[in-house]
Image (cartoon, grey):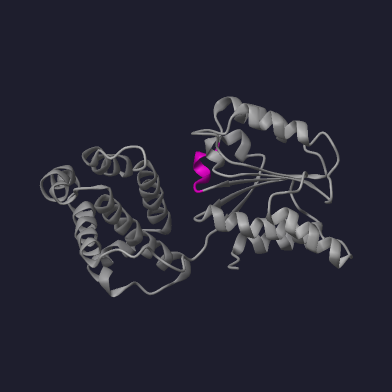
Amino acid sequence: MQESGGMQELKKQYHENRLSHAFLIETNNQELCLKNLLDFLSYINKTGNEAENEKLNSLILNDSIPSLKIIRPDGQNIKKEQILELKHFFQTKPTFSRYNMYILLNSESLNSSSANTMLKFLEEPEDNILGFFITNNRENIIHTIKSRCQILIDYYEESSKSIIPMVWQTLAVNYVKEYETIHDETLLYNKDVILPLLHDKKECFYFFESIFQIYQAFFQCKIFSKSLSSQYESLNFLMKKDAKYFFLQMNYLAKLLDDMNYNLNTTLLLDRFVLESR
């Protein structure tokens, strides 16, 4: 399994006996980060008994161990009741493991009530509890929680891309060129050029996913020193921008692609990307 810098840093801290009680992990692939994090938790809880270690590993990887709680948003938010339930579970000592452990996915989804409840949990950390907040953008995490966590960056190089017809990839290249150069006319370009070409949900997905892959390619050039695909040569002028710019554009597009499940007003989606990403 692919392991990135954040997991390596966790192992280093473990071996040096300086693990923090709470970590905020910013990543570009939450599910892969979660899988690697579960491997790490199996690693630090193992004993000298091989049979026990195999059982422990299976329990952790299948989210079947009482001392591990993985919390995902309930609807749009992580709710106060979920955090209260977590606190209740961890009033007892760990079962089958050295630590009580919790992982919050999409941790930016904490609302004000659940964040305040979580904050009280963090202010008086216990030695046998490890917590992990996973997010695509640490800037969206409430400051009072962020300040009580050690921040790790855990980026992964994408090994595969969605298969998209070349016509949409070409259209996306032309669109990004217009978007990046004629700022004042992009909304008009959306209406006159792009909107008539998008007829259904599949075509909208092809278009926005192709744009996402363009910014992802430039992001990987900055982070992993990869060579830029020849199909993006006409966008070489973007190389003057830094990795954070491409990461933010990817973040806007990822949210937009997710929202396509609830809203297929193409005009609003196009204009929203332009206005929010500015």
- Horizontally, is 31 left or right of 248 in the view? right
Question: Looking at this view, is 143 or 127 the one in front?
Answer: 127
Which stretch did the figure color magenta?
A: 136-141
**Compared to 56, does 260 lie above or below?**
above
Q: Position of residue 155 (x, y in %)?
A: 53, 60
Q: Is residue 245 visible?
A: yes
Question: Looking at this view, is 30 or 4 the one in front?
Answer: 30
Q: Quadrant of residue 112?
A: top right
- Verify whether residue 138 appears in magenta: yes
Q: Position of residue 139 (x, y in %)?
A: 50, 42
User: How many numbered marks, from 0 up?
Assistant: 0
Farthest top residue in view: 113
Q: Position of residue 5 (x, y in %)?
A: 60, 63
- Horizontally, is 197 left or right of 248 in the view? left
Residue at 51%, 56% (x, y): give it: 29
Q: Quadrant of residue 14?
A: bottom right
Image quarter in which the C terminus is found? top left
Residue at 69%, 28% (x, y): give it: 84
Image quarter in which the N terminus is found? bottom right
**Compared to 212, does 120 lie above or below?**
above
Q: Position of residue 165 (x, y in %)?
A: 26, 65
Q: Quadrant of residue 184?
A: top left
- Verify whether residue 132 appears in magenta: no
Farthest left residue in view: 192
Q: Is residue 124 visible?
A: no
Residue at 35%, 60% (x, y): give it: 213
